[in-house]
Amino acid sequence: PSDQALLVAVALGLAGYILWCMVRAVLDPFGRGRSMKGLAKRSGNVASALAYMVLLAGTLQILRGAGSPPDDGDWTARLLHAPAGAWLVGGVGVWWIIGPGLLQMVSGWRATFLEEFDNARMGVRERRWAKRIGRVGFTTRGFLFAVVGLLFVVAAMRMNPRATGGIDDAMLALSRYQNGPQLLDVTAAALIF
């Protein structure tokens, strides 16, 4: 398939996932309810939808021929030069480390994702493999999110908006360390799961 067809497929997949996140947040098909815990999970779905909207906007921009997606450093630079901007950028970084980062790792380790499965319809082997694969995937994703957060904290400390980045920048940063290529191999394999 052509690059254009693949980008259309990515855009459709992102749009579908955004819709699913909003359905989970608004219609509450899993019955999370209106308790603090339920509302926190549902608001997490809204946050996910917003994050994926940014990815969709970049994908659509590329499809329209406008070039590459917007540079994260642009908004970070504006924010760093605002009053208390370094604190705000650092706060975003800390939020990424604790929120998507550590919480995803804890969810992976504790296997809380299994609550989403219809365990009654799964066999013992299926549950065991789902738990193993889910642990690896959630923990790895959380680790990468924490590295993204760390890049924001470094940008705030150095007052350098170019130090921020996304998952690709986090993986590039990891590759620069001793045994970095091996760490990237393990990370890439874990993300496939």
Image (tube, rainbow, N blue to C red):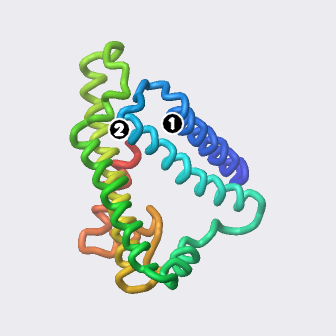
Residue 187 position in % (x across, y down): 33, 55
Q: Say which amino acid is labelled 2.
A: Met
Q: Element type at marker 1? A: helix
Q: Which residue is painted at 33% across and 53% down in the image?
A: 142
Q: Is residue 184 left or right of residue 76?
A: left
* Circle 1 residue: 25
Vertical relation: 111 (above or below) 175: above
Q: Which of 43 and 112 is in front in this view?
A: 43
Q: Distance between the residues labelled 2 and 1?
A: 14 Å
Q: x, y percentage for residue 53?
A: 60, 52
On screen, residue 150 versus residue 44, left or right, reads: left
List the residue tagged with mark 2: 36
Q: Is residue 30 above or below residue 153?
A: above
Is 179 left, or right, of 76 in this rendering? left
> What's the amino acid at mark 1?
Ala
| Residue 146: quarter of image | bottom left
Q: Position of residue 68 (x, y in %)?
A: 66, 68
